[in-house]
Image (tube, grey):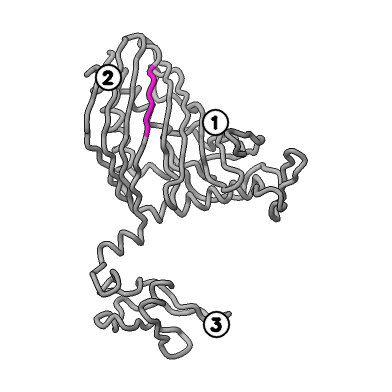
Amino acid sequence: MRIRLLVWLALAIMLFRCVPVTCSSRSNEPASVVRNDIEVTRRGSPAITPFLSPKLALCRYQERASLQLTALAGYSDETIIEAEIPEMKAKGQLRLRRTFSAPRSLSYTAVDFAGDTFVKTNVIYRLLKSEVKAVQDGEGQNRAISDSNYKFSFKGVETFQGRTFYVYTLKPRHKGPGRFKGKMFIDAETGHITRVQGILSKSPSWWIKHVEFTQRYADVEDFTMPVQMESVTEARIVGRVMVTIRHMTYEVHAVEQSKSAQNAAEVPGGSWPVQQPLQTRCTLDAPQGASPATLPAGCPHAGTLEKCSVVTRYGQPDELTVKDARQH
């Protein structure tokens, strides 16, 4: 019975590990917020403060998250998972390497483990299997902190370590795996998510009474990645199950970087894709009001690397140097 219970615990722990997604204008934030007698307006902040309005900050977060869905080709990191069942006096720690490739590939390589084998097998390993399955099943959109999944309401301003954050309450539009009731904290200057905390809105099993969690994020190059998650699960029979997951030493890869790595060849002065000097869908800026055609697959000048033709719909091909093409 305990093994079965721990299986449900592992699934419950994984249900709220969300990825932020998509932009929305439907929220209950005011057009401006007053703090320390300084008003931050929708049209831009005064010179004395760099703050965004709460509404604009929320949209900035969602736009960045939506872009990350299509721009993030993959990543790898070092992950440390600590799990403890106090009433059983059992705990364990696993260090591993995590590798993700968009859209549905996630793998782990164990580095070392210390602690009770029971915790490793019935909590940590089952947690990892649940996460892999969620990725393979494409559950990211269903678990995303997005307008399609949640209602957002602006609730106030908080400061921590000299920075200001806007606080939004999140209420799931529909109950389902991974949905939660809680709060989201967004940096008032950048519009980037920094933390979410909450309680699962629906228990995955009779064995699970309550799951509470906090997940923190940090910017890694052009992306926002989870760096730490802490959870406490109140379960029948075994009591509390506490899990902490930390992600470190991220290596992230953008979609365009991945394409370049596949097509690049060494040429004098640097690397350049020999078969396709300019991406297939790249367009040349046209005069105002005109719509340029896209570059045909494969450039006729690919072999020489001297120039690249971009055909417009209203005239002769315009020729770009390799340097100009890279900047385009």
Dot 1 or dot 3: first in sequence order is 1
Q: Quadrant of the N terminus?
A: top left
Q: Is residue 177 visible?
A: no
Question: Could you tell me what secondary structure mostly forms the magenta stretch?
Answer: strand
Q: Identity of the amino acid at label 2?
A: Val
Q: Is residue 286 above or below residue 146?
A: below
Query: Could you classify mark 3 by the number of other residues whose Cα lies within 10 Å: few (under 14), some (14-19), or many (20 or more)?
Result: few
Report x, y in % for residue 93: 29, 24
At a point 46% along the width and 45% down the height, the residue shown is 219
Check disc 3 and report the residue beneath it.
Answer: 287
Report x, y in % for residue 28: 66, 42
Residue nearer the viewer, 176 or 293 = 293
Dot 2 or dot 1: first in sequence order is 2
Span of residues in magenta:
241-246
Whole-number angstrom distance, CA of label 1 to CA of label 3: 49 Å
Q: Report the mark closest to the observer, 1 or 3.
A: 3
Report x, y in % for residue 191: 57, 47
Q: Quadrant of the C terminus?
A: bottom left
Residue nearer the viewer, 298 or 252 = 252
Residue 163 belongs to magenta span: no
Residue 182: which disc? Answer: 1
Residue 285: which disc? Answer: none
Check disc 2 and report the residue beneath it.
Answer: 119
Dividing the picture into quadrants, the one containing residue 258 is bottom left
Residue nearer the viewer, 145 or 272 = 272
At a point 67% along the width and 43% down the height, the residue shown is 29
Task: Give the total number of marks visible in the rendering.
Answer: 3
Q: Is residue 126 above or below residue 34?
A: above
**Left or right: where 80 falls relative to 109:** right
Q: Is residue 205 above or below residue 154?
A: above
Q: Identity of the amino acid at label 1?
A: Gly
